[in-house]
Amino acid sequence: MNRRDFIGTLAGAGSVLAIGCRSSQPQGAPAAGSPDRAPDSAAATVPALAGSPAVPAAATRRTLGRTGIAVDPVSLGGEGILRTYGREREAVPVILEALSLGVRYCDTAPAYAQSQDYYGAAFREAGRAARDRVFLASKTHDRGRDGSLRLLEDSLRRIGTDRLDLWQLHDLRDDGDLDAIFGRGGAIEALVAARERSLVRFVGITGHTDPRVLVEAMRRFPFDSVLCAMNPADRVRASFLREVVPEARRRGVGVIGMKVLGRGRIVADGQATAAELIRYASCFADTCIIGCDSLAEVRQNLGMRDGFSEMPEAERAALESRLAGRADRYTYYKG
């Protein structure tokens, strides 16, 4: 059965798939607020991505939760110039530059305009080996099984790949989302079925509105990762750092950071540099996805991997205090 036939069969099926298939509390989960570091020894190796050999572990490299996949503190986001229409001449070179610099984790989503198409064009130009060397994440914003499977088929077609490394339930906002996803015929059935058929390797959730919703989702299902908002203004209200990150760490769930720059507002206001904000978020996330608008931004952000140093607690506290008075502006995405 080919991919299209399989997805079509699933979409027409009426049976409810079993979803409680793995333990949600693995032994030896990392402590809250401390990303699980890969060994610093030059002789150590990190898990290889598909099609690439194991490489010496970098001192700054972390493990993405229970996936066992090694990621860098900074990764390529699916927004920025990638969340546009008709700008392939500008967007594709951004991806190609990231690939040439050895980016390990790449993010996209059906909701991000032509982002997936740009990735497809970049992989066609760079070759299949380039695709196999990255951990590729996409999403479904549909809350049902059938609609999610159709989105998955479209994502694979547009990107030009036979599988996703991570497929995420996109932008969980309220209890209604959870009821739909976990109800009969909900999107969770699509995630389980796609993973069982190796169309996706791992499954996760994303959200930036209400941390309580992400915590409840993790309690209902053993997700492999959570993508949530985090910047120094987060702790003022509805804090993802206080609520989501500790829960994820307790369960061995990989943590991915977004909204790290507050959509560029923090830097534009002169409150902090991009480097400061990335260093801050990297104290809590295994990797931070940053959308880029230019080749210069790709080089600057990914260049932080060389000589990367974590931000001391006192410096983090000072940065939080500096941004607290404008928290509403910098956490505009919260409900």
Image: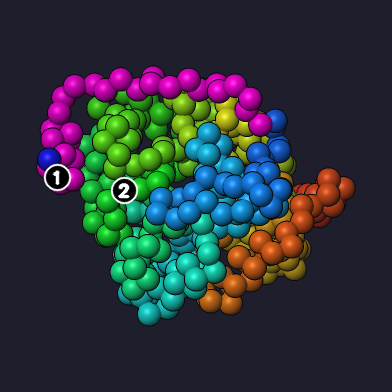
Instruction: Tell me residue 233's x, y (percent).
Output: 71, 49
**For mark 2, what is the residue?**
163
- Find disc 1 in the rendering and name its residue: 2
Q: Is residue 77 magenta?
A: no
Tag 1: Cα neighbours inside 10 Å, few (<14), some, or many (≥20)? few
Q: Kindly state the secondary structure of the residue where label 2 is placed.
A: loop
Q: Main secondary structure of the magenta part?
A: loop
For residue 1, side relative to residue 103 (left or right): left
Secondary structure at badge 1 equals loop
Tell me: residue 273, above or below residue 5: below
Instruction: Identify which residue is drawn at 29% across, 55% down.
Output: 161
Q: Which residue is found at the position 31% from the left and 23% from the top?
A: 183
Relative to residue 14, is residue 158 depicted above or below? Answer: below
Query: Rounded to the nearest whole Å, what is the CA distance between mark 1 and mark 2?
Result: 13 Å
Indicate the quadrant where residue 266 lies: bottom right
Q: Is residue 265 visible?
A: no
Q: Which mark is first along the chain, 2 or 1?
A: 1
Q: Residue at x 58, y 77 (%)?
A: 296
Q: Residue at x 15, y 28 (%)?
A: 13
Q: Nearer the viewer, residue 265 or 242?
A: 242
What colour scheme has been applied to the protein in the rendered image?
A: rainbow
Q: Amino acid at mark 2?
A: Arg
Q: Seen in the image, is 303 located left or right of residue 204?
A: right
